[in-house]
Image: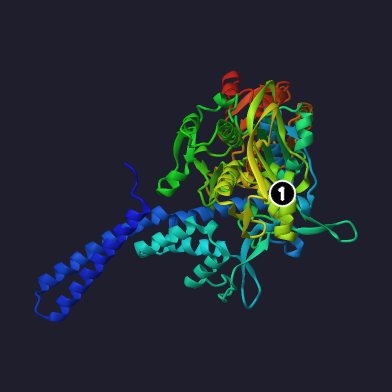
Amino acid sequence: MAAPSEDVLRRALAERQAAVDAQAEAVRALKAGGGASKADVDAAVEALKALKIEAGAAARRLQQAVGAGAGGAAREELRQAVVNTLERKLFYIPSFKIYRGVAGLYDYGPPGCRVKANVLSFWRQHFVLEENMLEVDCPCVTPEIVLKASGHVEKFTDLMVKDEKTGTCYRADHLLKDFCKEKLEKDLTLPQEKADEFKRVLAILDDLSAEELGAKIKEYGIVAPDTKNPLSDPYPFNLMFQTSIGPTGLSVGYMRPETAQGIFVNFKDLYYYNGQKLPFAAAQIGQAFRNEISPRQGLLRVREFTLAEIEHFVDPEDKSHPKFVDVADLEFLMFPREMQLSGESAKLMKLGEAVSKGTVNNETLGYFIGRVYLFLTRLGIDKGRLRFRQHLPNEMAHYAADCWDAEIESSYGWIECVGIADRSAYDLRAHCEKSGVPLVAHEKFSKPREVEKLVIVPSKKDLGLAFKGNQKMVLEALEAMSEKEALEMKAALETQGETIFKVCTLGKDVVITKKMVSISMEKKLEHQRVFTPSVIEPSFGIGRIIYCLFEHSFYTRPSKSEEEQLNVFRFPPLVAPIKCTVFPLVKNQEFDDAAKVIAKALTTAGISHIIDTTAISIGRRYARTDEIGVPFAVTVDSTANVTIRERDSKEQVRVDINEVASVVQQLTEGQTTWGEVCEKYPAHVGPQGDQE
């Protein structure tokens, strides 16, 4: 049976609380009247107690449903344990720490660098190599004209408010979001209509204008979180870091907010390099920069971060994919927009069914959703805490055909880590219009085809006389009309002699007469089809994926004495920062020499490792490497054969010293499993068993 929804639980609590209030009033009336017997008063008091118990139980059920109380505390406790371990073991630390740091900037330390390198290496293997993609590496500094064409200069903004007394800046939508979530999670007596209102605000948050956002902030009495001072009205703040190119300062540039534009502007050359064939994909890994207003949530919201992006160019008339069958049977949590709007939860769906029913727009988009699922789960992301959420109508860009986010659940809630979008032909068209360079593909016909083509011929002379300095904008608007718009104009001109036409660049309607433009349909023989390709774009936030991986991999277990909890990262060998440690059991020259022989063989096999010859107990050495996620430990207690220990099971097998590197290599590369190794080699149980 499905659990009751939050709305049902909130109504139940309100009903029980109303019953408590009514019974309390009845008890007061009985006591005040003086005519009631002691037995009647006692019975009324007992009924009040029973109602209070029921109301308390209803409050606890609601509290559990909204994630407040103990659940929230547990998430906070997990987050602190993970972050403390990560910073103490130097996975990452705040940048410029000795100068008190800068919000939203972090340094990766030695183990963090290795995890990141391993994630990116697997990304290249899983996508670039397996899909035969074309990899590029473009500059971070981008000329303004490129980002004007893409829309970033005008639209890449967040709405900001300021503390009116201190000048401290906050993201307006974050303040409103936090207020609504806190009310829903912590105010259990919230009336149902108010709860519904807060939920509606959260659902349409991305669609609120500056005026609407400001009105809500005033209506709810939201103030600066740190000082409780009043806030300014929201106003747009562009998130790009601006710079200048060259010594004069006249050439404006920006630090790129994404890596995709470098691929789009190189489309013509990449298309030629690929033999002028579609479909093909280009990929890029690189730094991106966003001047976040008030960064928070550690690695999840930063000002400089690593993106890995793919632009898969495809014929808009054929978005099938020959390898879709390879992922069609995958089943995972999907959250289509209809389920979100009706208040349901994500559910398991087969990818093939989602595409065949039209839930996912096309096979190529579906194929990349499947490949992203495989990538994330092989890294070590928990399948049960990974879902693919479809963008709601208010989130969708006007040009997008469909868009899904791979969201991973962490202590911060569901976090968008990968966006997989069908961006149609928007980007190539935008750069084509701005640069004047045709960014198109060609389909050659085996035989010429007769096609009916729309021909729009504006009269520059008549347009010039009518619109003078605005002639060019009217001319461009006429030439850019869709076939439907042009045919409607043609019919109006033939029947009425003139028509009203909206020119967006002028921001007003103008009158077009029959003399100003000729519109006709003409039959032509064509030898090829020229079109602007659509693009399917998977975009990966590497830092976000890595942080979620840290949380999903972290657990604690008691030490042998059970007086302390030991931290462990259960990284798969694929991403572990160090694959293997080598421990001489005791300080002994023969054991040290044997350890060096093993280390040399591991180096030759390309396996990252460390030798630990410290004098502390072997159990403590195991615990120390478990804490940074090393999957295998080799303990040298003989010059002939040694033991290999697996981190999570703590099982050990005895292996000939000459086979160690080969066994560890097969394990780390996924050629064999620990279970298969245990079947092949004798188990070791002895004085060097788990002693943490």
Q: From the viewer's side, name the closer residue of 231 and 446.
A: 446
Residue bearing the label numbered 1: 459
Is any atom of residue 559 visible in this view? no
Question: Looking at the picture, does residue 276 appear above or below residue 459?
Answer: above
Rendered location of residue 677, percent (x, y):
60, 22
Residue at x 75%, y 48% (from the top left corner): 434
Name the side, left or right, on which 66 lies relative to 501.
left
Residue at horizontal 55 percent and vertical 65 percent from the top: 175
Quadrant in the rendering for residue 183: bottom left
> In the rendered image, is residue 550 in sight?
yes
Q: Secondary structure at mark 1?
A: loop
For the N terminus, the quadrant is top left
Horizontal and vertical percent for residue 143? 80, 52
Q: Residues within 10 Å of mark 1 (few under 14, many from 20)?
A: some
The foreground one among 615 and 576 is 576
Q: Position of residue 585 (x, y in %)?
A: 69, 34
* Snapshot quadrant of residue 581: top right
- Which quarter of the image is occupied by the C terminus? top right
